[in-house]
Amino acid sequence: KNTHMQQDKVKWFQYFSYAAGLITMSPILQFFLPQQGLALSHIQLQEPAAILFAQHWGMMAFCMGLLLIWAAQQPIQRKPVLVLVALEKLALVALIAVNWQTDGLQGMHLAGIFDAICVAVLAVFLLKNR
C-alpha cells in the first residue's frame, strides 16, 4: 500500500511537472518575436536594452520549463533542479509582488500567481521528499 501511494505521488508530480513546464516554456515567443510576445501580457517596450532583457527572459523561462519536464523523469537529479527552478520562480513572484501596483506591470500578475502556485507545490514536494 505504501509503495502504491508513493507511486501515485510520483505520477501526480510528473503530471504537474509536465503541465507547469509547458506553461513555463511559453515565453519563448518573446525570444523570437519580443514585441508580439510582450503584447500578450499587455506590455510594450521601446528601449533596446529592455527588449534584449525581455528576449533573454523568454529564453530563460523556456529553459526553466524544460528543466521542470526533465526533472519529472530524473529522480536522482530532481531535487537540485527543483530547488533552482523554485528559487528562480520565487524571485519573479517577489519582484511582481513588490511592484504589484506599478503602472504597466499588470500584465505580469498572472505570471506571478502561476509562479507562486508552482513555488508552493515545489516546496511541499521537496519538503515531503527530503
Image (cartoon, rainbow, N blue to C red):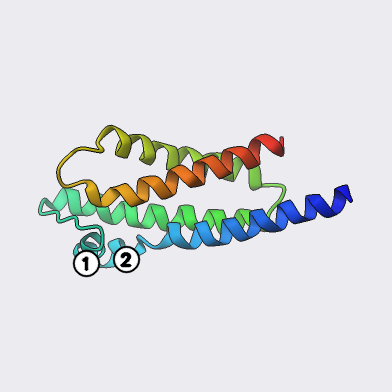
Does 66 sit above or below residue 32?
above
- Residue 47, position as x, y percentages in the image: 11, 50
Instruction: Locate the C terminus by quadrant.
Output: top right
Q: Secondary structure at mark 2?
A: helix
15 lies above or below 57? below
Secondary structure category for the residue under label 1: helix
**Residue plotted at (58% across, 38% down):** 123
Tell whether label 2 touches label 1 (CB within 8 Å): yes
Residue at the image position 64 percent from the left and 39 percent from the top: 126
Horizontal side of 68 relative to 129 (left or right) equals left
- Circle 1 is placed at which residue position? 36
Foreground pick, 29 / 106: 106
Q: Nearer the viewer, residue 127 or 65?
A: 127
Query: Whole-percent x and y of residue 53?
Result: 25, 49
What label does residue 69 carry, if any?
Answer: none
Q: Nearer the viewer, residue 118 or 64?
A: 118
- Name the residue: 58% across, 56% down: 17
In the picture of the structure, the residue carrying the numbered disc 2 is: 29
The quarter of the displayed image where residue 16 is located = bottom right
User: Type of residue at label 1?
Assistant: Gln
* Tally of numbered tags: 2
Label located before the other in sequence (1 or 2):
2
Q: What's the amino acid at mark 2?
A: Leu
Give the x, y percent position of residue 118: 50, 47
